C-alpha cells in the first residue's frame, strides 16, 4: 500500500515554497492531496514547527494556500503551514456530492460511526496519519512542535481537535468557527449522518461541550468573527463557546470584527495576528 | 443604453472594501465586470488615486482580487485598485473560446482592426471608457491621478498603454510581462488575428518597439521576472525590452527573481514593492 507522498507541484513564495503532495491514505481508503508551505531555511538541519490549517465546507487543500496570504507571516516567523483536504474524495459513496454542506468537502474532522460513511475519518487522518506521514517523510519539520487553526467547519475542527489533544498542540485559533455544532443546522445534519442519532456521541465533537469538560487548557484561544458574516446568527454561536470558556476558566480572546463577512478576504485581513499567536506558543 | 455600474458584491478587507461591479460597455458591446478595492477612508470627501491592474491570459477581474494580497499595501498607502476583465465575453464569436491564449480571456489590450474581432477593443475600454465611467460614478476616486500595472499579457498591456499615454499615467510596473509580442508565439497569434498581417501595425502594441520611439519617459519602470518562469525563454523577452530602454535612455529597474515561477505566488511575494512604487509616483 502506497503511503509515501509524491510531490505534484512546487511554487516559490516569500522565499519559501508551496508544495503540493499526493498520497494514499490508509485511514480514509483513498488518495489525498495536501499542501505544505516550507519557509525559507538558512540551514539544512533546521527544523520548522508546524501549523495545521483546517479549511471550511467545500474547500480543498488549495483555497488557503491560494487566498489567505498566510505565507508572508509564516515566512517571517519560520513556521511551516500544513493544509490538508476537507474530506475523502473519489469513493463514490451514494449521495456523497448531493449537497455542499455534507459528504465530499464536508468531513467535519470527525470519525464517522455509521457504516455508510465509514471512510469519513478526518479526525484520525488529521490527528494521527498526517503527523506520522510528515514526521517520516519531511526531516525539515519538527512535528512534535505543532499548533492548529482553521475556518468555519475547519475552525470547529481546530477547536475540537485541540481540546481533545492538549498534549499534541501548543495553541489553537479560529476564524468564524462552528462553535456549537450540536445546536446548528450544519452540525445536526452532519452528525446525524456520520454519528447516528445518539446526541451524547455528538458532544465528543462539539467545542462548546468539550471546553466545559476540560479544565487543563492553558494557552489563550484566539477567535476572530466577522460581524457581517451571514452564517453568524444561525450556524456559528461564538457566544455559546465564550460562555463555556468563562465557566471553565479557559482564556479566550474573541474578537468581533465589524463589517467583515465569512470569506477569505476576512481571513487574509487578520491572518498575521493568528500566525503570530501560534509562533509565540511554538517558540515557548 | 445602460452604462451605470451596478454593485454585485462587496467584502471588507484590510479596513476597505473589495466591490465588484457590472455594466454594459459601449466600447465592447457587451456586459462587463470589474473590481474596485476602496481603501479605508477617514473622510468622506477624500479622493483616492487609482492604480489599474491588467490581468494575464485566462483571467477575469477576480484573480488579482482573490490571490495577489495587494489590498494590504493598497490599504496602507491609500491607493484604490481597479481590476477590469481581460476581454469581451458572451458575444459568441465563432472560435472565441477555442484556445486559452486567444479570444475570450485574451484581449491583449488592443483595438482589433479585423472585422470578425471588432468588439475586441480592450485598449479603448481600459484607456477611455473605464476611466470615464469611474470618474462619473465614484466621487471617492481621483481618476486624474492614475498609474497602471499588470501581469504577463496584462504586463504587456500596462507597458504599452503607459508608453502611449504618458499624460494619463504617473507610473507603470509589471510582473513577467510579454515585452516583445511581435516576436513571440502568443503575440504573433493574437496580432495576426486581431490586427491582420501588416507587421507595422503590430508595433503600436509592442512595448519594446514603443519604448524605442518614445524619449519622454521620466518615471522609472519597474519589472519583476521570475527566473524559473516556464514562459521566460519563448514568450516574455525582458532582455529585449531592457536593451530598448537602454538605447532610449529610459530608466528601467528589471529584477530577476531566482526560483520564482509565473504564478500569483510570485506576484504576491513582490506586490508590496509595486504598490509602493506607484504610491510614491501618485503622491508627487
Image (tube, coloured by chain):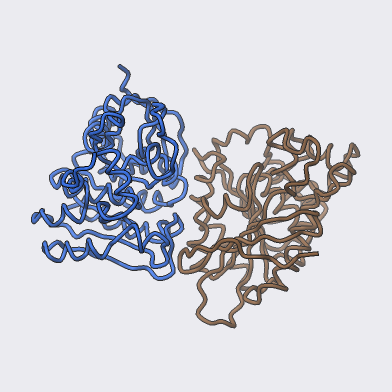
Chain colours: A blue, B brown
Q: Residue at x 37, y 26 (%)?
A: A31
Q: Is residue A42 above or below residue B211?
A: above
Q: Residue most toward the left?
A: A215
Picture quadrant of residue A184: bottom left
Q: Position of residue B73 (x, y in %)?
A: 50, 63
Q: Is residue A237 above or below residue B93?
A: below
Q: Is residue A256 above or below residue A34?
A: below
Q: Residue at x 55, y 38 (%)?
A: B227
Q: Residue most toward the front?
A: A197
Picture quadrant of residue A16: top left
Q: Residue at x 37, y 30 (%)?
A: A32
Q: How many marks?
A: 0
Q: Is residue B55 left or right of residue A83?
A: right
Q: Nearer the viewer, residue A207 or B127?
A: A207
Quadrant showing the N terminus of chain A? top left
Q: Position of residue B196 (x, y in %)?
A: 89, 39
Q: Position of residue A103 (x, y in %)?
A: 37, 37
Q: Nearer the viewer, residue B9 or B60?
A: B9
Q: Residue at x 84, y 44 (%)?
A: B117
Q: Is residue B148 left or right of residue B19?
A: right
Q: Position of residue B244 (x, y in %)?
A: 75, 47
Amino acid at each position: 500500500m502506497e503511503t509515501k507522498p509524491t510531490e505534484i507541484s512546487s511554487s516559490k513564495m516569500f522565499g519559501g515554497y508551496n508544495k503540493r503532495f499526493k498520497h494514499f491514505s490508509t485511514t480514509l481508503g483513498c488518495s489525498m492531496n495536501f499542501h505544505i508551505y516550507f519557509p525559507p531555511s538558512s540551514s539544512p538541519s533546521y527544523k520548522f514547527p508546524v501549523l495545521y490549517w483546517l479549511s471550511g465546507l467545500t474547500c480543498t487543500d488549495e483555497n488557503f494556500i491560494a487566498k489567505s496570504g498566510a505565507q508572508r507571516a509564516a515566512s517571517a516567523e519560520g513556521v511551516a503551514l500544513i493544509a490538508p483536504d476537507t474530506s475523502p474524495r473519489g469513493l463514490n459513496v451514494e449521495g456523497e456530492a448531493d449537497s455542499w454542506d455534507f459528504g465530499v468537502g464536508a468531513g467535519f474532522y470527525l470519525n464517522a460511526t455509521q457504516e455508510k460513511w465509514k471512510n469519513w475519518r478526518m479526525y484520525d487522518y488529521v490527528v494521527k496519519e498526517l503527523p506520522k506521514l510528515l514526521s517520516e517523510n519531511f526531516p525539515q519539520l519538527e512535528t512534535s512542535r505543532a499548533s492548529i487553526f482553521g475556518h468555519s467547519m475547519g475552525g470547529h475542527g481546530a477547536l475540537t481537535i485541540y481540546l481533545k489533544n492538549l498534549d499534541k498542540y501548543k495553541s489553537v485559533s479560529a476564524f468564524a468557527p462552528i462553535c456549537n455544532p450540536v445546536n446548528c443546522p450544519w452540525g445536526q445534519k452532519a452528525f446525524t449522518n456520520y454519528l447516528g442519532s445518539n446526541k451524547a456521541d455528538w458532544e465528543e465533537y462539539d467545542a462548546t461541550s468539550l471546553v466545559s469538560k476540560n479544565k487543563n487548557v492553558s494557552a489563550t484561544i484566539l477567535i476572530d468573527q466577522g460581524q457581517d458574516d451571514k452564517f453568524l446568527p444561525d450556524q456559528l454561536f461564538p457566544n455559546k463557546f465564550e460562555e463555556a470558556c468563562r465557566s471553565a476558566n479557559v482564556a479566550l480572546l474573541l474578537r468581533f470584527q465589524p463589517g467583515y463577512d465569512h470569506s477569505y478576504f476576512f481571513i487574509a485581513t487578520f491572518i498575521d495576528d493568528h500566525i503570530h499567536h501560534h509562533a509565540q506558543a511554538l517558540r515557548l
